[in-house]
Amino acid sequence: MNNRFRNLVYGLAFAIMVGFILWIGRPIFIPVISGVISVYVLSTAATSLGKVPVVGALIPLWLRHIAALLVFIFLGFLLVLLFAENIQRVIALAPQYQETLLGFAGDIAKMLDIDDEPSWGTIRNLILGEIDLQRLISTTVTSVSVLGGQVFVVFLYASFLLAERLHFSRKIVIAATTPKDAKRIMEVVSNVNERIGNYLTVKTLVNVLLGLISYICMRLIGVDFAGFFAVLIGVLNYIPYVGSMVGVAFPVLLTAAQFGSLEKIIIVLVSLTASQMFMGGVVEPRLLGRSMNLSPFVVLISLTVWYALWGIGGAILAVPMTSVVVIILAEFQPTRPIAILLSQDGRIADSGEVTEKAAA
């Protein structure tokens, strides 16, 4: 009993220490982990291109990796430019949006028969009238410049990690004490690579499709900055549960500020929500299946924990990071029960079983 209590205290102290280090070192860890995650997507994309008969025969793997990296860099800088350009346009239209939003709030007040109440004027002046949208949006310009710097660092890490990946297997064999240990480590790494790579690649494809569908819906309705919000919806959809709701909320709020029409707001809300439900409830489960095998409650808790440690970046990385932890815990007999509890259905295969199934 004393040994169990002592181990529990040691484990709790270790968890607190690791959490504190992760929180303190988030400016360093987030770009590094983002670079690692990017390498997973790039490697899976390059490998998938090799399965195309013409591409696989003519283009070697290293050249496919370079091509995927160049496309990734181009899309990243395009994303930063898109954010910067649209923020400037929103700043210019902010006063007009604010007037429309105040008028819409007044119409809602008339519908509720509270327009003549003295309290309504006070509430409007205190809450809506004092909001300076132009100043609020202007403060995000600095954030965009910071985002651009972080994207550059992620690209730099991803480039070096791709080069290191070619020699990683050989270094593992040299570093391991015995060939058996080297084989087991490589099996664990292969398991992590396969599951995380497949998840991120499929999730990225789903998010691109969701962004395209959302763009078409907003474009048909006439919502301003449809391309910007489509990209934002796709990025936020990496965050489980919460990301889809936040992604829909932004264009709905802009619709209220742009049109001041309850009918337009309902149309945008229904169309974007239906797109989220279709992609998240029909398409994504068919493509992903149960590849991550994480309990929904565990995903929600991990989302909260990683967001508390690393903010939005931690929320986006919550599922891949938690899945890696579960895979590693499943490889050791003392921690295997913890991995079973964190899984969705309790079925945890170690790396040896995964390798045997792949060979079969």
Image (cartoon, helix red, strand yellow):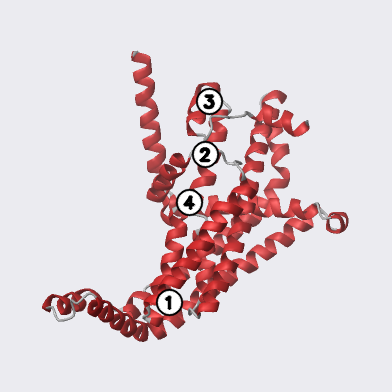
- Bin the neighbour count of mark 3 within 10 Å (Cα to Cα): few under 14, some 14-19, many 20 and up: some
The residue that disc 1 covers is: 264
Q: Nearer the viewer, residue 172 or 238?
A: 238
Q: Which of pointers 1 and 4 indicates the residue nearer the eye? A: 1
- Where does the image place residue 72, in percent across and percent down from the top left? 65, 63
Label 3 element class: helix
Amino acid type, residue under disc 1 in the picture = Lys
Mark 1–mark 2 Cα distance, whole angstroms, equals: 38 Å
- Where does the image place residue 326, in percent across and percent down from the top left? 53, 35
From the viewer's perspective, is residue 290 above or below residue 107? Answer: above
User: Tag 1 or tag 3, which sits nearer the N-term?
Assistant: 1
Q: Nearer the viewer, residue 32 or 204?
A: 204
User: Tag 2 or tag 3, which sits nearer the N-term?
Assistant: 2
Relative to 95, 71 lies left or right: right
- Bin the neighbour count of mark 2 within 10 Å (Cα to Cα): few under 14, some 14-19, many 20 and up: many
The residue that disc 2 covers is: 294
- Where does the image place residue 145, in percent across and percent down from the top left? 47, 71
- Where does the image place residue 148, in percent across and percent down from the top left? 51, 68
Label 4 element class: loop
Q: Quadrant of residue 158?
A: bottom right
Q: Nearer the viewer, residue 83 or 263?
A: 263
Amino acid type, residue under disc 2 in the picture = Leu
